[in-house]
Image: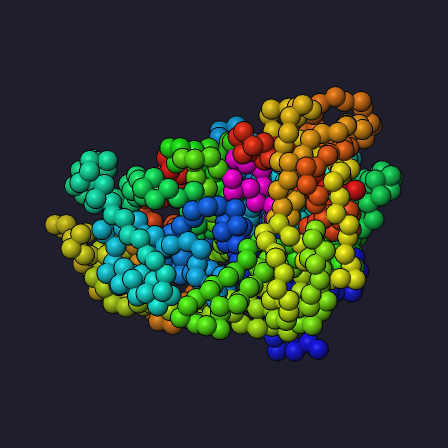
Amino acid sequence: MSTLTKQTLSHLDWLEAEAIHILREVAGQCSNPVLLFSGGKDSICLLRLAEKAFRPGRFPFPLMHIDTGHNYKEVTDFRDKRAAELGERLIVRSVEDSMARGTVVLKHADESRNKHQSVTLLEAIEEFGFDACIGGARRDEEKARAKERIMSFRDEFGQWDPKNQRPELWNLYNARSHKGENIRAFPISNWTELDVWQYIQREQLELPSIYFAHVRPVVRKNGLLQPVTELTPARPGDKVEDVQVRFRTVGDITCTAPVESDADTVEKILAETATTTITERGATRMDDQTSEASMEQRKKEGYF
Amino acid sequence: MSAPEQLPEIDNGLLRFLTCGSVDDGKSTLIGRLLFDSKTILADTLNAIEKTSAKRGMSAVDLSLLTDGLQAEREQGITIDVAYRYFSTGRRKYIIADAPGHEQYTRNMVTAASTANLAIILVDARKGVLTQTRRHSYLASLVGIPHLLVAVNKMDLVDYDQAVFERIKADYLAFADKLGIKDVRFIPISALAGDMIVDRGDRLSWYDGPTLLDILENAPAAHTEQAEDFRFPVQFVCRPQDSANPELHDYRGFMGRVESGEIAVGDAVTVLPSGATSKVRRIEIGGVPLERAIHEQSVALLLEDEIDISRGDLIVKSAEAPEPVKQIDATVCWLAEAPLSPARTYLVRHTTREVKAKLARIDYRLDVNTLEHEAATGLAMNDIARVTLKLAQPIVADRYAGNRATGAFIIIDESTNNTVGAGMIG
């Protein structure tokens, strides 16, 4: 192999350039896309990438959050603040509205609303006629995602068929869909959790405070820390402890667990992430532990 | 001309590589070993595969379980689609495209190869060079992967015998020459025992070359070391016309990715297919100016003159302008279950341009096992053929061998919007 080396991009610059390219392909190919913004770290990266892709213009899509009504206030406050700073339109649609309409029916009052986001998302897609949803999912998060396309096709029912995916070659993305169908676009597919934190550090991105170490009452259950909140109160017999924790993902309160950590800066989180021994979803997601294939099952049903 | 502080920071970048081999070659074990030895596998993942290994009655942890993603595959025990894996050594980030080696999945191998710059071709030391070794090598060279690494695996099962390795190497070189494969290296390994992957081990002392990971760490990250012509397909035109900011009223940013070559402020450019010319006034990322942009950077170009430019146009340096064409000769891989119909009109996506296309003729179909040419009147899934396509509007293309980005296209069936074919011009 030749010893001559042509100048190439650093890995973070390469990932950034790829994500910008994908965002512009969505804007160029789809007539009515939307960017899903939860206030979480992955979608915070997406917003910076969208700035790099489209400024000084406005984003060619609104932002949308599907709110389970069970999100940490620090995160929803941050979501609203960030959208206002960017001067972009934020749409919020709520799982509680779907419950009121009767389209989401919980098996029991305590059931996590997390998987029911799919219903509200599909209702919002129909309401606004979105033909593409841009999301911050990454292939390294979970096994079923490793084969997900960057432009992933969903049928009229929002379903993903893992055996019938469009081949995706070179960087020639096919985001075409017929009316009623939908494309899910994942610009940071090729990023790992470490890449995300490195990007947050490099771009000095602001995050909701619960990503950083803080003291919180928790109960230890099944090897996970369950936060004690109004929604998830301690049960009789539970031993409540005050523990220094941080959240690695900030989803629905009922199914997102913090990890023990004293990392209170991005630098310390990076050091921790580089040496961590538990995968991101494994440490924090109670809904993925159910069975080896649970994410695949939810995706087939229209989950993000 | 160039301002060094504006250039991207150099680390050893990112390498995308492909692994090919069949279920029995130990491909999944090799990937598992790379992830495991580079400490990329985390405790809970390992815990899950330990449980599964035990459930299947295995004595040791089966590293191949790490890469079996979907339920259907786990049930069938074969990899049926391309999966992407990630690991990082601190020096470099890697993206592995894991392509199944199964006979009917030529299309997956082509898909995985399309974004890779290096291919690891696994050969079972006991079996030597097989038909599928030739097929994988041919497909890798067809899709233009510049570096091939033949890993002779399962050396533990042939007593780490150097003569076995040398015989396989000689067999491989005999046919590689016929395929025009230039950059090929050989390495003896045992993925199961971990010899010569990340650590050298002590059973292959007769081999004095670098370990497999060393080869990956030092392989060139760029697709080609040649200087390439500047190619910039326009993806999106930014016209803010923000009344609050009168300075932006005339702003026109042509947004895209530098697919090859590089561009600097002041360079003379031509817009194709119109042929209009201008000079680069500004280069920006997110509104922040740069002096120049290199291969693979996503930027916005602002020109000195007001020219009508839209998505699908190609900006090139005026001295390097290719000719628009309305007919292309190409090697096509058919990807869809529904066969190609010579009577139908399809859509060709080339860079950011979409044009209607019809088959003019099929020169021949290629048998990927024997490399013999066969007469054909249609194409079925996994067929590879030399064809000529007529286009409704011109495209501005290069030969694939000279430029991957402007030499490649996909074929879309408008009735389903499925991607049904992949083509390489030239």
On the rendered structure, is B46 left or right of A68? right
Say which residue appears at 76% left-offset and 33% top-offset: B388
Instruction: Tell me the quarter of the image containing the C terminus of chain A.
Output: top left
Looking at the rendered structure, the number of numbered marks drawn on it comes to 0
Examine the rendering and report whether any part of residue B113 can be seen: no
State whether residue A223 is above or below residue B249.
Answer: above
Out of A254 and B334, give the one closest to the viewer. Answer: B334
Say which residue appears at 38% left-offset and 54% top-offset: A62
Instruction: Tell me the quarter of the image containing the N terminus of chain A.
Output: bottom right
Residue sitting at the far left:
A236
On the rendered structure, is A155 left or right of B18? left
Quarter-of-image position of residue A78: bottom left
Q: Within the magenta stretch, is there residue A125?
A: no
Residue B115 x/y as whole percent: 64, 48
Say which residue appears at 40% left-offset and 32% top-offset: A156
Say which residue appears at 15% left-offset and 55% top-offset: A230
Out of B360 and B136, give the one closest to the viewer. Answer: B360
Residue A218 x/y as whole percent: 22, 58
> What kind of secondary structure does the magenta stretch mostly adopt?
loop
Q: Within the magenta stretch, is there residue A168?
A: yes
On the rendered structure, is B63 left or right of A156? right
Which residues are the magenta region? A165-176
Examine the rendering and report whether any part of residue A269 can be seen: yes
Quarter-of-image position of residue A299: top left
Residue B202 x/y as whole percent: 70, 54
On the rendered structure, is B54 left or right of B258? left
Give the image's coloring scheme: rainbow
